[in-house]
Amino acid sequence: MLFGCIYVPDFPVQAALRVDTGQISFQNDSVAVLDGPESLQKVYSCNDRARQAGVEIGMTKLQAEACCGIVLHKRNPAEEDLAQSALLQCAYGFSPRVESTCPGTVIADLSGAGRLLGSPQDMGRQLVSRAAACDFTVNVGVAANADTAMHAARGFTGITVIAAGEEAKRLSHLPVEVLQPSLEILDTFDSWGIRNFQALAALPPLPLTQRLGQPGLHLQRLARGEVQRELVPAEAPPRFRETLELEEAVDLLEPLGFLLNRLLQELLERLQVMSLATDHVQLDFELEVHRDRQLKTENASSLAADAVQPLYQRTLKMPVPTQDAKVLLKLLQLDLAAHPPPAPVKKITVEVVPARVRLTQAGLFQPLAPEPAKLEVTLARLRAAVGEQTMDEMGKQDETATARVGFPMVMDSHRPDSFQVLPCSSEHKEIRECPPAPRLVLRWFRPPLPARVECATSTTETRRHGESRNAIPSTVIFNGVKARVIHACGPWRSSGAWWDQARQWARDEWDVELSMNPPQSAGLYRIFRDAQSGEWFVEGMYD
């Protein structure tokens, strides 16, 4: 059996510094965390530097401010929960059995991991390195039972490895406060002169039990390193989320991208530890909005409509999960460049939705497809260059607007040139290859070219069907060129969406062979007449 314990000294202080964007260091600066109501805040936790400066637990805010060079933070339980989740995920990178013993302390079962991780000393170094990547300064204890590893991490600095059978000897000089007994038992130990583990372990068990009961005997067994117990497995954190609160609001995209990179790196490292990826990123920006400083207008309704909301959210979805933080950062930068926050950002929250890594194997004779992540970045660049959706003549998105970047798909409709552009998704079905066959290909003109058409009417057909249907095109004029119609086939009437005034259409189509000057432009064309406006257009050319 082998257990490793990660202990974070002064956990509330380190949890507060993880979301601090300043140059405050846990080891080099005096930091204290305050808790309580605004009218009476007291010191809840502090680091060694603050204690050397004279800060004590329970001091009021005014007393703490009197100490030279002290940095004060307000306690935030949400930040501590996020820090504990990050600490758990550090331990999950070494073992699937992890216990969340208390805030700032986790224990991992390292039994059987020697071949993969090396010696116990190497395991301790890797635990420290992984915790440092998550912005923690920790102590690590490795021992044959969980409680001994925990007490070694709490009582000694750095990495402590205790071999089996040496628990009592190695823990003997630790103070009894490391056991965290109740205040009543601690006062009793003080009155007896019990100051360390060695003195407690030397007491006779029976008289100790008679005076302190089973809690006293349990503390003695802990001091001797004799307690063997099973870990209580902690549930894996359901959410991968990081928050960063800024001292000064940021209104430029470049420094905002630098901060996003830091958060994404931490989140992706935690995902990689659990062999996960992400295809969904949620950004929440808390904006610096001063409603009392906004200019007042006479129209209150327009002011309410134009008011900036204090929370700005953006969502990024990818077709394939990825573990590349650089790709996600680039996509977020392109998205924010197209949709910048309307006000300076004072707090950033990034949450990634975990997903399984998708592995694919290409065939030997199959052409290599572009990497999904790089393809998504390319599509994002195209969206930034050409826009996300089509616009109407006034430069606004209409009701029938379609996406400009993605995969085209023909719609189930008789409307000519009816298609939609779908976003990239791994759920798209593969396009089946059609058997080779000679066929004409129509090269569409978008938009169709306006034309003026002269028609000749057959006298026989006029008496039979009427003049309006059988006016055969004889001359087509478009793009400054007058062409003579050699052959014409049609008309073919198509119409639809009569129930929708904005989307209905009705037109007569013709396929014509034109003779032009220069002759290189001669060929087969499709023209049509809009039945509603009576105007002619050249829709395309057959290759």
Image (cartoon, rainbow, N blue to C red):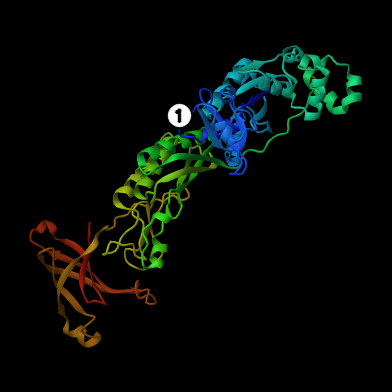
Q: Residue at image x 10%, y 64%?
A: 480
**Relative height, residue 281 to residue 70 (above, below):** below
Whether residue 66 is visible, yes or no, is yes
**Relative height, residue 524 to residue 260 (above, below):** below
Q: Specify the amino acid type for callout 1.
A: Gln
**Relative height, residue 6 to residue 358 (above, below):** above
Please state the horizontal and vertical placement of residue 504, each as a whole percent of the image.
34, 74
Asked which quadrant contains residue 54, the reply is top right
Identify the residue position indicated by label 1 in the image: 23
**Viewer-proximal residue among 374 and 199:** 199
390 relative to 125 in the view: left or right: left
Total count of labels: 1
Q: Residue at image x 35%, y 46%?
A: 337
**Viewer-proximal residue among 104 and 185:** 185
The residue at the far left in this view is: 517
Whether residue 86 is visible, yes or no, is no
Please state the horizontal and vertical placement of residue 236, each as a whole percent of the image.
63, 38
**Viewer-proximal residue among 496 and 129:** 129
Secondary structure of residue under mark 1: loop
The N terminus lies in quadrant? top right
Q: Residue at image x 44%, y 55%?
A: 309
